[in-house]
């Protein structure tokens, strides 16, 4: 079976989200605010990278041009990545200073906003006409539900915590919220794959996402931020300035030693 | 319980008597070799007890084993495949292939009773049944887990993720021992 160019493009959008967020979360390894959270973040990163590997391998087989998961992960440049921009932002948030300012509130809120979306996406894709994608979705959904659980509990604990933790999680939410609009943006690829019952129409996930997110924010004594006109475009291949730095670290070994193996 | 392919000996009586072929004894032998392959991260349980072996097919000198991963990113998956091949090679199956199958996904409900008993004896609380409802995040509410050391139900969760993605970290308030809980998946 060979997949259409649009099918491959759709799979890259699905794979690059967990790949890039997994790489960002891996930056916390050894730097978590507590040992338990350090372990949690790296375990979540491992799940995400595992999900990305499954989807990228599937894309490579469908494409039939000999590209494997490593070719996709390590030998594409920034403009070929299809992750939503929110996931490439530094752990300190979009507007913070250097990487040394990694902010746990930003990581928790980002994980919460994204995993809530990803769980709905996997749930819908469990019925995909692409049988391999459906199998990956069913498998990944079980993991993603634990990610939502983890991030939602911390959002509540921080939001309904001290004045300082409330202020920091509120600031993180305000900074990340405008990037969430991109989860629901669609183009001809999304529509064609939804029509073919392989993919899911992103807009159909927005109402359940908003409802689930609002419930947790309410419990966390946080206001749902007002909508903004800002639109990020990473899933269409137009990224911010941060993705290049993520790739520089993630791809270094394969760029320096092409084809190198462990 | 997932639909696992059962070894030949465990299948119900067929309507018509089957004449055991030369490969059936070999298939049973391959299954028993898999009893000797331990999970690399929890070496007290075998890959069969963990419920990740889906099928074993013997065709002459060749054997193909279907394995399903526990977690998508589990780093043990590749080690398990290599361990299976070398155990089969040591048992006389020089041409062994391990195939990864995703569907239906692995669930902790597939861990056998013997596997659960061994986990508990090892100090890991075995997973409870998979509840149909997705977990809801409400102020760190947690399920009741019995301490594998003293059996007390007076335990608390310290972290959602433990030493591996499949475990959560708990502490017993009665005997004060920390322990791993194998999370239902």
Image (cartoon, grey):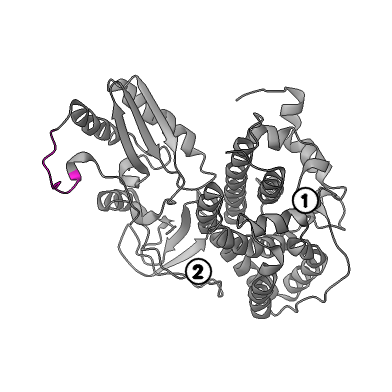
Tell me which corner region of the image, top left, top right, bottom left or bottom right, holds residue A92: bottom right
Q: Secondary structure at mark 1?
A: helix
Tell me which corner region of the image, top left, top right, bottom left or bottom right, holds residue A78: top right
Q: Decide: is B63 above or below A135.
A: above
B98 horizontally vs A29: left or right: left
Q: Which residue is mark 2?
A: B135
- Residue A141 visible here: yes
For the residues labelled 2 and 1, the Cα–Cα distance comes to 28 Å
Q: Position of residue A212 (x, y in %)?
A: 63, 74
Q: Secondary structure at mark 2?
A: loop
Q: Decide: is A184 above or below B104.
A: below
A161 horizontally vs B131: left or right: right
Q: Decide: is B54 above or below A102.
A: above
Q: Decide: is A119 above or below B31.
A: below
Q: Which residue is mark 1?
A: A88
Label 2: chain letter: B
B133 horizontally vs A76: left or right: left
Label 1: chain letter: A
- The quadrant of the picture occupied by the N terminus of chain B is bottom left
Q: The magenta stretch spans which residues? A: B10-19
Residue positioned 12% across, 33% down in the render: B19
What's the mark number on residue A4?
none
| SS majority, magenta | loop
């Amino acid at each position: 079976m060979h997949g259409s160019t649009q099918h491959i493009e759709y799979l890259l959008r699905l794979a690059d989200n967990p790949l890039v967020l997994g790489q960002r979360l891996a930056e916390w390894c050894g730097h978590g605010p507590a040992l338990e959270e350090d372990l949690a973040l790296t375990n979540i990163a491992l799940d995400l990278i595992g999900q990305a590997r499954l989807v990228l391998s599937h894309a490579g087989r469908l494409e039939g041009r000999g590209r494997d998961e490593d070719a996709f992960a390590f030998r594409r440049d920034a403009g070929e990545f299809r992750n939503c921009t929110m996931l490439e932002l530094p752990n300190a948030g979009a507007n913070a200073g250097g990487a040394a300012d990694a902010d746990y509130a930003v990581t928790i809120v980002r994980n919460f906003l994204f995993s809530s979306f990803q769980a709905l996406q996997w749930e819908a894709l469990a019925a995909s006409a692409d049988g391999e994608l459906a199998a990956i979705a069913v498998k990944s959904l079980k993991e993603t539900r634990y990610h939502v659980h983890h991030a939602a509990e911390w959002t509540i604990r921080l939001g309904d915590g001290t004045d300082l933790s409330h202020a920091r999680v509120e600031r993180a939410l305000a900074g990340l919220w405008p990037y969430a609009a991109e989860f629901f943006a669609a183009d001809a690829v999304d529509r064609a794959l939804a029509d073919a019952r392989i993919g899911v129409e992103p807009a159909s996930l927005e109402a359940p996402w908003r409802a689930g997110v609002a419930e947790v924010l309410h419990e966390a004594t946080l206001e749902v931020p007002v909508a903004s006109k800002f639109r990020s475009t990473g899933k269409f291949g137009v990224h911010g300035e941060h993705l290049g730095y993520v790739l520089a670290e993630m791809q270094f070994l394969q760029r320096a030693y092409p084809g190198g193996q462990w | 319980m997932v639909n696992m392919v059962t070894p030949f000996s465990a299948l119900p009586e067929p309507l018509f008597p089957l004449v055991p072929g030369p490969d059936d004894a070999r298939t049973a032998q391959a299954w028993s070799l898999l009893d000797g392959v331990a999970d690399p991260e929890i070496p007290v349980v075998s890959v069969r007890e963990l419920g990740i072996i889906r099928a074993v097919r013997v065709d002459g000198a060749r054997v193909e084993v279907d394995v399903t991963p526990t977690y998508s990113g589990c780093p043990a998956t590749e080690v398990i495949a290599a361990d299976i091949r070398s155990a089969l090679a040591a048992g006389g199956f020089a041409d062994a292939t391990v195939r990864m199958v995703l569907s239906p996904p692995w669930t902790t409900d597939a861990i056998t009773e013997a596997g659960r008993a061994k986990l508990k004896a090892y100090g890991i609380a075995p997973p409870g049944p998979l509840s149909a409802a997705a977990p809801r995040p409400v102020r760190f509410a947690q399920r009741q887990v019995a301490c594998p050391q003293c059996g007390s139900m007076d335990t608390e969760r310290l972290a959602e993720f433990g030493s591996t993605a499949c475990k959560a970290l708990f502490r017993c308030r009665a005997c004060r021992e920390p322990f791993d809980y194998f999370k239902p998946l």
